[in-house]
Image (cartoon, rainbow, N blue to C red):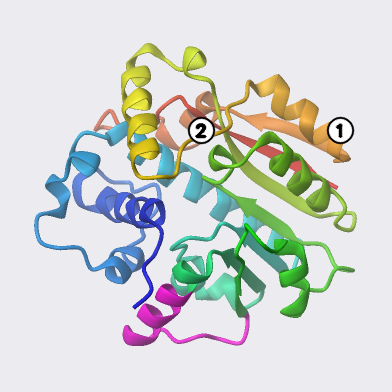
């Protein structure tokens, strides 16, 4: 059987763990990803689960941010949603009220999508007509060409979400991706995460980042690209986006973490580029 990407599994587990160990109100409720992974008993005690509350907070915040964005955009009659590096995203299964009004295109490595499709079938979710899996071997083919083969309408605006991906891409690959998305028709929106260099992180996050980088190298998926906020804005504007702004960790704190009783706060390493064509 195909295997999903380890990072996608960890992200799904963090989303599931949020509703088990953090206080209400939950930033996002995602137990579908946990069902997909079906981890062994005691998974909550794994070091990458037990000692990473700030990373978990970042993951649930970015998932909520994307979800809020696509819901807002769907109300403005945007009908296409591209998830670039979809991993074990579960929006289509959890938010059927919104998803059923969209054409959703999940783009990722063939093994991850094949595994996910099999698990969805096993759990009884199936594949509705509005959900399209776009398997792409990023080493040998370009995601845009594969997307067009699945019925995507290039003449209609879309929302593109790309989280947790830029870290593994070269700057050249990121620029190519930004230019392709900036060429979408007017009214399209991109929400994409980038990662700060370690010296721009809060002190309390630097040791965790060093451990994460070491682990990524060991597992054969090294971190490649880090950017300061002004560099991200420059890349977006050079790529041709009409408007671009940064959503920082401080912004996320204001959106989702005010007045929490458990002290949960996101790590400082990730920022969002929010850009429109």
Q: Is residue 124 magenta?
A: yes
- Residue at 81 percent across and 52 percent down: it is 180
In the rendered image of this protein, does residue 89 appear above or below residue 150?
above
Return the residue nearer the eye: 94 or 230.
Answer: 230
Q: What stretch is highlighted in magenta?
A: 114-130
Quadrant housing residue 55 = top left
> Closer to us: mark 1 or mark 2?
1
Residue 24: give its label.
none
Left or right side of 40 for 226: right
Residue in view at x 15 percent, y 54 percent: 43
Helix, strand or loop at label 2? It is helix
Could you tell whether 81 is left or right of 78 in the image?
A: left
Find out whether residue 18 is within the magenta segment.
Answer: no
Please provide percent x and percent y for residue 41.
10, 61
Mark-to-mark CA distance, 1 and 2: 26 Å
Q: Mark 2 points at which residue?
A: 252
| Label 1 crowd bin: few (<14), some (14–19), many (20+), radius 10 Å | some
Q: Is residue 99 above or below residue 255?
A: below
| Residue 27 picture location, percent across and down | 39, 47
Residue 18 place in picture, x, y as percent: 28, 48
Identity of the residue drawn at 39% across and 51% down: 7
Q: Which mark is residue 238?
A: 1
Quarter the N terminus occupies: bottom left
């Amino acid at each position: 059987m195909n295997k999903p990407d380890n990072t996608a599994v960890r992200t799904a587990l963090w989303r599931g763990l949020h509703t088990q160990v953090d206080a209400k109100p939950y930033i996002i409720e995602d137990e579908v990803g946990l069902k997909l992974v079906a981890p062994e008993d005691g998974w909550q005690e794994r070091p990458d689960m037990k000692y990473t509350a700030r990373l978990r907070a970042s993951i649930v915040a970015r998932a909520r941010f994307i979800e809020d964005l696509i819901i807002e955009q769907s109300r403005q009659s945007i009908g296409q949603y591209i998830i670039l590096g979809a991993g074990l995203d579960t929006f289509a299964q959890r938010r059927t009220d919104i998803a059923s009004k969209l054409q959703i295109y999940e783009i990722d490595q063939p093994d991850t999508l094949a595994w996910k499709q099999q698990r969805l079938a096993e759990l009884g979710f199936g594949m509705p007509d509005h959900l399209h899996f776009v398997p792409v071997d990023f080493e040998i083919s370009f995601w845009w060409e594969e997307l067009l083969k699945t019925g995507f309408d290039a003449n209609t605006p879309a929302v593109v979400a790309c989280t947790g991906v830029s870290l593994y891409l070269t700057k050249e690959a990121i620029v190519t991706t930004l230019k392709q998305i900036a060429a979408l028709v007017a009214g399209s929106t991109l929400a994409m995460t980038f990662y700060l260099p370690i010296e721009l992180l809060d002190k309390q996050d630097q040791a965790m980042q060093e451990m994460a980088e070491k682990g990524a190298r060991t597992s054969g998926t090294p971190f490649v690209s880090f950017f300061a906020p002004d560099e991200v804005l420059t890349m977006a504007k050079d790529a041709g986006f009409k408007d671009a702004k940064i959503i920082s960790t401080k912004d996320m704190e204001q959106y989702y973490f005010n007045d929490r009783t458990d002290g949960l706060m996101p790590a400082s390493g990730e920022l969002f580029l929010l850009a429109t064509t």
